Image (tube, grey):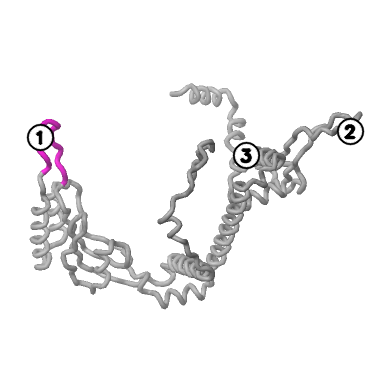
Amino acid sequence: MSWKMILSFVACLAIPAGAQESIRSPKSLPSTATLPATYPIITISKPCSQTKAAGAKKAGPCQTVITRTEFEALVHAINPRMPKAEQQELAERYGTALALSQEAIRRGMDHEKDVKALIHYQQISVLANAMTKDIYRENTTSDPEAVEAYYNSHKDKFERFSFERIYIPAEKQAVAQPADSGNGEPDTRPEMKALADKIYARAKAGEDFDKLQREAFKAADITTEPTAKIDNLRSGDLSTVQNVIFDMKPGEMSPLLTDASGYFIYKLVSRVVPPYKEVHDAVDLQLQQETHTKSMKDLEALAKTQVNKKYFDDYDPPAPNPNEPEVETD
């Protein structure tokens, strides 16, 4: 047990029960909305510029104040659900950034070519992000009638499939060899391919899928208890090779399907379209995603972007100034 845990435990013992309860359940604080709009959140103080006028008194501190309204507008723009602790961290970082930016302006850095290019790019990025959010908001407000109409015309997208499946690994599970044995792992792929062909023939003849799956795992030295039943799949849930099974009819068996991991045999048990009420949320989400994708493509089509590949393929950029510090980019 660490010293922190011990001290916390001892402290709790010394506090009366009523006081402990108040610590565990702190009283709710009043809302910041009760504060004046001009309530100061961040205050930056620095010496004012010295005047050269004869007999002038020394200038006092100059202040920049970020009010509640300004700060809360920034929080909302970044994340309307930002936790209180993160808001305080933001205030501290914002204050430091503001002080540095003011000094940069005083030095005229806002007129430098590199800084102007970054400011321009940041403005574009912020506006693009705002546009993306706006499109997202537009598409997350679904019309109930539109959602139900989408379901009625796309029922195949929400159909649920149940299968029996046999999986035969491409290779046997590797058996640990002594470090000094000098023996490499044997190639078991031909053996497993022959096994897959035999199991497929037996499945085609009507043998039990669970029994055949257990035999396949045993032959592959896999000790996990297998199951041949797979329920509640949707069309497109599997790899490209296996997705052909969604075109089958109940009772139909697939050919022996092969991918890098091994061999698959499927038999379709059932395919049903759930009632609208049962899949309403999935339908709503699907419609939102498709509408959002279409809106983004429509916007992109308004301004076609062409990148001159000759610039990148046929030329190298100028060598950087060796005196410039290296900058990490995300």
Residue visible at 70% across and 46% down? 32
Q: Is residue 174 magenta?
A: yes
Question: SS at mark 3?
Answer: helix
Q: Which mark is residue 182?
A: 1
Residue in the image at 18% along x and 69% along y: 253
Which mark's residue is nearer the viewer, 1 or 2?
2
User: Residue beneath label 3, please?
Assistant: 93
Nearer-N-terminus badge (3/2): 2
Q: Specify start and end residues of the magenta stretch as a single range.
A: 173-185
Q: Earlier in the sequence, mark 3 or mark 1?
A: 3
Left or right of residue 319: residue 197: left
Q: Is residue 225 above or below residue 265?
A: above
The N terminus, quarter of image: top left
Is residue 92 rendered magenta in the image? no
Residue 305 seen in the figure: yes
The residue under label 3 is which amino acid type? Arg
Q: Which one is nearer the viewer's eye here, 69 or 285?
A: 69
